[in-house]
């Protein structure tokens, strides 16, 4: 059997594919458009693996997706493909609407038609797992409980609105057509292979290069942080034992202000790679202009997943962050390849 993983050359997708092939007998077809965020180097350890097949293409290309589903007799689709960066969505939302809404719609339609034509046995096993975000629940106040699966959607950024729209389509394809779906809304992920436009890898890179560590506004915004491997484990569990049609929140039970995140990161770097002048990397922290419409707080109540599927995160923020910093220190070549060309252009535009 084979699963189709979309967005497989991105951050979470590549971690998922690498972990999957370590643990499962099922083959993987990786579909990725290779946008600026897609990086085949993330999957290069699979170059000689006969159980992995990479295809460059768009989730919105119905002919391509349908032919892959047929050719590989796909048993499940895991949809990571998305435009994922809030700041980019604020500057230019078009691709977010295209991939996160229309792309998801096209993928659902390809899956529906394929699934309808399957034999009864294969149909019973088919699953469509859609990856989404805690940002769809909108901003919480400091006294609100963490978001749970019954909370209403109140997205605020073009990114979160596009993810929310995709989630609604997934729900509708279950309610209307009985496509066997799951929706997974996760907290902020961090770990190996994350593109350094996001807070943690950006600050690791800038710290090592002696550049400012940019904190938007006062740095008091709160995010819940989830180590990417814990997220991948939760997805595997949901695919195996989840209840069809259900939504599952995945979080790290680890709320931190952005300033706390960057300060923790600096202490780990101070311990692992002291600067030649013996000063702390924390001296590089620089407060910069705030993000437009910056949501104050996201937090995830992941108790449903623990109660029903016995999943909880293995890493604390402290252990996960240390692993992450070590990975970036040990993979400087990966970082150097990633930060060429288009990346420089983005940094200039965003932080000038
Ligand atoms: P990413 O930006 O690192 O990777 C996205 C991947 O999708 C890239 O490889 C890109 O080339 C590919 N892609 C983009 N458009 C495509 C298209 N039209 N067709 C095929 N491939 C396409 O993102 P990520 O951080 O790995 O996020 C993966 C998923 O998880 C996204 O759906 C995102 O919304 C969701 N999510 C991310 C986080 C996080 O903290 N990173 C948190 C919650 C949810
Ligand atoms: P980010 O990693 O972009 O993820 P998201 O916007 O999906 O939560 O940002 C995490 C938090 O860090 C968010 O509150 C914005 C903030 N941030 C900064 O303060 N400085 C930065 O340079 C970046 C990229 C983010």
Image: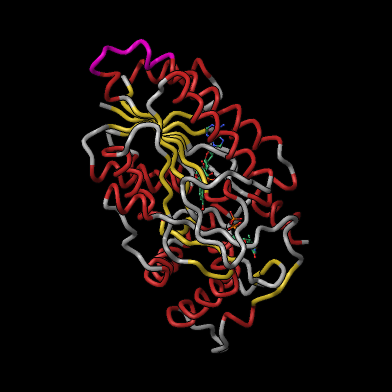
Q: Position of residue 20 (x, y in %)?
A: 30, 42
Q: Which residues are magenta?
A: 113-121
Q: Position of residue 202 (x, y in %)?
A: 58, 62
- Position of 209 relative to 280 (above/below): above
Residue at screen point 31% across, 62% down: 314
Which part of the image, by quadrant, shows the C terminus? bottom right
- Position of 98 relative to 113 (above/below): below
- Position of 56 relative to 258 (above/below): above
Residue at screen point 32% across, 36% down: 243
Q: Nearer the viewer, residue 217 or 67?
A: 217
Which part of the image, by quadrant, shows the N terminus? top left
Q: Main secondary structure of the magenta part?
A: helix
- Position of 49 relative to 173 (above/below): below
Q: Is residue 298 magenta?
A: no
Q: Which of the 4 quarters of the picture holds residue 36? A: top right
Q: Is residue 53 visible?
A: no
Residue at screen point 58% across, 72% down: 207
In the picture provided, is 59 more to the left or to the right than 13? right
In the picture provided, is 210 more to the left or to the right than 200? right
Q: Position of residue 88 (x, y in %)?
A: 68, 48
């Amino acid at each position: 059997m084979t699963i189709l993983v979309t967005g497989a050359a991105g951050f979470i997708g590549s971690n998922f594919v690498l972990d999957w092939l370590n643990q499962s007998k099922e083959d993987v077809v990786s579909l990725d458009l290779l946008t600026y965020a897609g990086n085949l180097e993330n999957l290069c350890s699979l170059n000689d693996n006969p159980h992995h097949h990479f295809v460059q293409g768009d989730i919105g290309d119905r002919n391509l997706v349908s032919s892959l589903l047929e050719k590989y007799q796909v048993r499940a689709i895991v949809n990571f493909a998305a435009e994922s960066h809030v700041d980019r969505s604020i500057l230019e939302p078009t691709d977010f609407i295209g991939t996160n809404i229309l792309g998801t719609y096209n993928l659902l339609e390809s899956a529906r038609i394929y699934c309808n034509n399957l034999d009864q046995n294969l149909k019973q096993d088919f699953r469509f797992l859609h990856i989404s975000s805690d940002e769809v629940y909108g901003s919480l106040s400091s006294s609100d409980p963490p978001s749970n699966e019954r909370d209403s959607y109140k997205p605020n950024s073009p990114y979160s609105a596009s993810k929310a729209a995709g989630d609604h389509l997934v729900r509708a394809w279950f309610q209307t057509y009985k496509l066997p779906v799951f929706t997974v809304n996760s907290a902020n992920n961090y770990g190996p292979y994350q593109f350094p436009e996001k807070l943690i890898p950006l600050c690791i890179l800038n710290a090592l290069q002696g550049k400012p560590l940019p904190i938007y506004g006062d740095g008091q915004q709160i995010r819940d942080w989830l180590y990417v491997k814990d997220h991948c484990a939760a997805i595997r569990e949901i695919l195996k034992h989840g209840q069809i049609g259900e939504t599952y929140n995945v979080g790290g039970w680890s709320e931190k202000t952005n300033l706390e995140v960057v300060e923790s990161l600096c202490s780990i770097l101070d311990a692992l790679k002291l600067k030649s002048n013996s000063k702390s990397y924390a001296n590089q922290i620089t407060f910069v202009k705030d993000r437009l419409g910056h949501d104050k707080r996201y937090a995830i109540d992941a108790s449903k997943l623990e109660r029903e599927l016995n999943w909880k995160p293995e890493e604390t923020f402290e252990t996960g962050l240390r692993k992450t910093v070590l990975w970036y220190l040990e993979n400087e070549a990966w970082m150097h390849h990633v930060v060429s060309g288009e990346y420089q252009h983005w940094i200039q535009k965003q932080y000038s």
